Amino acid sequence: MSEDKKNNSLFKKIQIFVFANYRQIIISIVIVLILFVGFQLYNYFKIQDIKKSSISFFDVIQENQNDLSNLESLINDNNIFSILSKLKLIQKNNKNKNFSYSNELYKELIADSDLNSLYKSSIAANASYTMINATYEENTNNYLNDISGYINNISDDLDAYFSIKKELEYLLIVTEIDLNKSEYNNSKALDKYNEIFNSNLVSASIKERVKKIHEFQLYK
């Protein structure tokens, strides 16, 4: 009997609480429903946008490999196909030696916080090599700060990119020396060269490439 009284007492307390706070409870339920429906709608439209971008991307790629101008409309879609579109446009503009535009696309990709460190390091390394080459082709120092930024975005936590990062650091120093027509001897390039050759973490192939550049700089 006492158990029934306890249950009745609890039920009455709940009843009193509900009646006393029914407005707040209704408002809370409505807010939860709005958030739930909003989240579902957001996901739906996000999926539709991705599908639309996917169709557009592959239509452009299949229709004409030489004219990728329609990819410009996809680069701001903030999804995987905007990244793929930028990479495809970079490839095309590098081939056409339109390096300044490629450089802007590289910077946008590197600034994308959604990229994990592996993809960001890969793009940063590619950007560094490309823009070092562009610096020589155009004989300009306009890209040097950006190249330094790309190199800094190569993760130190990825063993596979350690050697590449060290090589790029050396190449950037050499590029600055060549642009400024400075002396290679007694420069910080020699310190970087020694750092690379004294490191057990730098691969043999990178050391060999750096050695050839070092010897060329010494005896040119």
Image (cartoon, rainbow, N blue to C red):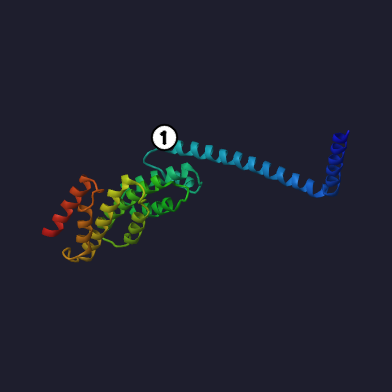
- Left/right placement of residue 70 relative to residue 147 reads right
Q: Nearer the viewer, residue 39 or 15?
A: 15
Instruction: Confirm whether residue 103 shows in the render.
Output: yes
Please give left or right for residue 110 compared with residue 36 in the image.
Answer: left
Using the image as rendered, state which of residue 12 and residue 202 is in the foreground: 12
The residue drawn where x is 82% and y is 49% is 21
Residue 52 image offset from top left, x and y in percent? 53, 38
Quarter location, residue 187: bottom left
The residue closer to the viewer here, 37 or 108, is 37
Q: Residue furthest front?
A: 2
Viewer can see residue 220: no
**Residue drawn at (21%, 45%), measured in percent from left and top?**
205
Q: Regarding mark 1 in the picture, which secondary structure is present there?
A: helix
As drawn, is 43 to the left or to the right of 54?
right
- Where residue 198 appears, x then y in whole percent? 20, 53
Residue 190: image location, x then y, percent: 19, 60
Which residue carries the number 1 mark?
62
Residue furthest top as drawn: 1
Residue 174 versus residue 26: which sits nearer the camera? 26
Three-letter residue code for mark 1:
Gln
Question: Which image quadrant: the C terminus?
Answer: bottom left
Coordinates of residue 163 in the picture (x, y in percent) = 27, 49
Is 117 placed left or right of 194 in the picture?
A: right
User: As displayed, is residue 51 above or below residue 149?
Assistant: above
